Amino acid sequence: MIIINAKIFDGVKFIPQDCVETEHGRVKALYGPAAARTMPGKKMDLKGMILSPGFIDIHAHGALGLDIQHIQSVRSIRRITSYYLKTGVTSVVFACFYGGNSMQLGLIKNARSGRGRGAAVLGAYLEGPCISIEKKGMIPAEFIGRDAGPALRLAGKKTPIRLMTIAPEVEGSRRVIDECLRRSVVPCFGHSTAGYEETKSSINAGIKSVTHLFNAMAGMHHREPGPFAAIAESGIYAELIADGAHVHPAIMKMAFELIGPQRIILVTDSCAAAGCKRGPVDTGFGRYTLKNGAAYLRDGRLAGSTTPLCRMVQNAVKWCGITCEQALRTVAYNPASLLGIDDIGVIRPGAMADFNVLDGDLNLKKTIMADRTVQKN
């Protein structure tokens, strides 16, 4: 495949080259316009539109009425990944809870093949079990307070656990952080009552990122700054759900100003209602109603997001005063960097040929995966 006349965003910045040649599902070379004119073969002319890496969502729970926690087959996972591909997400990490049964982890592991039929499954994100019952959010109590050791030992058996949420105030959390680092699992702060000092100490101990910043954590006060101040002054990454329901746009803007787009990772934290055109949606966690890009329980509690990642990128530009370049970085290079993966989230020789084509307003027009167009919008 030869793509010409593209405004290429390489994962971090726009680059002067405007032509990409791919081969066997990977980027072969980048060229300027003069070289592209003389290259033989059929070309895809983007006519000045943006070519970005395929988006990476590192925190997703489900879609199309299906929740990862309750699915029974790889086929169901692939239904969810097909939805994600339609939204420009070419790589996804599925979040679940661990209660002593590794079936969900096994299904996620077995779903990691089949590129092009849906978003590539990178692995699992365990929210807990080493988290606070007071800040559990939608996580059932049965998945909280268990020994995290058995789950991490599964990571040592090639079960694809990529990230784990840890509350630093919970007994044994320091040991869990150490074990995560030893097994190449990213330890994330979240679902926590910890304040400023405890959060800062956990970052010094090895916490690398934050699970959905502001949600399920202590707030901020002028005499008790809470976790956000420690996070802002650190060098770690922080997830942000940019649907306007989980975090007010004014607070989103403050996060981008104080943390910076080089450390923010936009995530959907999607629930089973994502991709459903109308509600209510019955799920294993209850009946969800849909409103303004989010899902709610009957009692009004926020249950999860239904806003696709491509819309969140637009929201970040609209609400936070950042550039297209800065917004795209949050769903490309940043998540790949956190996971330690160097061949996605970027456009450079050797990287996967997973791309999104967007217009100047960041409307998603086309998704290309493994050398072929897989979705036109």
Image (cartoon, rainbow, N blue to C red):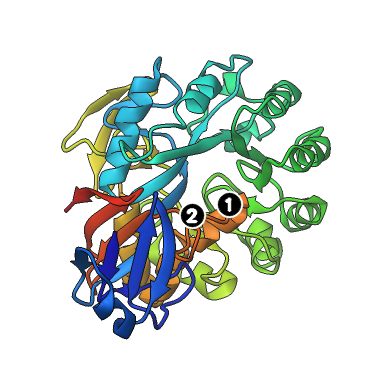
Provide the secondary structure element on which disc 2 rests. Answer: loop
Q: Residue at x 18, y 75 (%)?
A: 47
**Vertical position of residue 74 compared to residue 359: above or below:** above
The residue under label 2 is which amino acid type?
Ile
Choose between 366 and 304: the one closer to the eye: 366
> Which image quarter: residue 320?
bottom left
- From this viewpoint, is residue 306 visible? no
- From this viewpoint, is residue 97 visible? yes
Left or right: 63 as drawn, with respect to 257 = left
Q: Which residue is mark 2?
A: 344
Choose between 67 and 196: the one closer to the eye: 67
The residue under label 1 is which amino acid type?
Ile
* Cα distance in 3D space between marks 2 and 1: 7 Å
Q: How far across and down, in percent of the image, does residue 35 sit?
A: 33, 80
Q: Residue at x 57, y 56 (%)?
A: 342
C-beta proximity under 8 Å, tags 2 and 1? yes
Q: Residue at x 32, y 67 (%)?
A: 51
Provide the secondary structure element on which disc 1 rests. Answer: loop
Residue 341's disc number = 1
> Which image quarter: residue 113?
top left
> Which image quarter: residue 276?
top left
**Vertical position of residue 168 compared to residue 203: above or below:** above
Residue 102's disc number = none
Q: How far across and down, in percent of the image, does residue 150 sit?
A: 72, 21
Q: Residue at x 19, y 32 (%)?
A: 279
Left or right: 183 as drawn, with respect to 66 = right
Number of numbered discs: 2
- Of the 4 image quadrants, the one containing the N terminus is bottom left
Q: How far across and down, in percent of the image, does residue 184 sit?
A: 71, 42
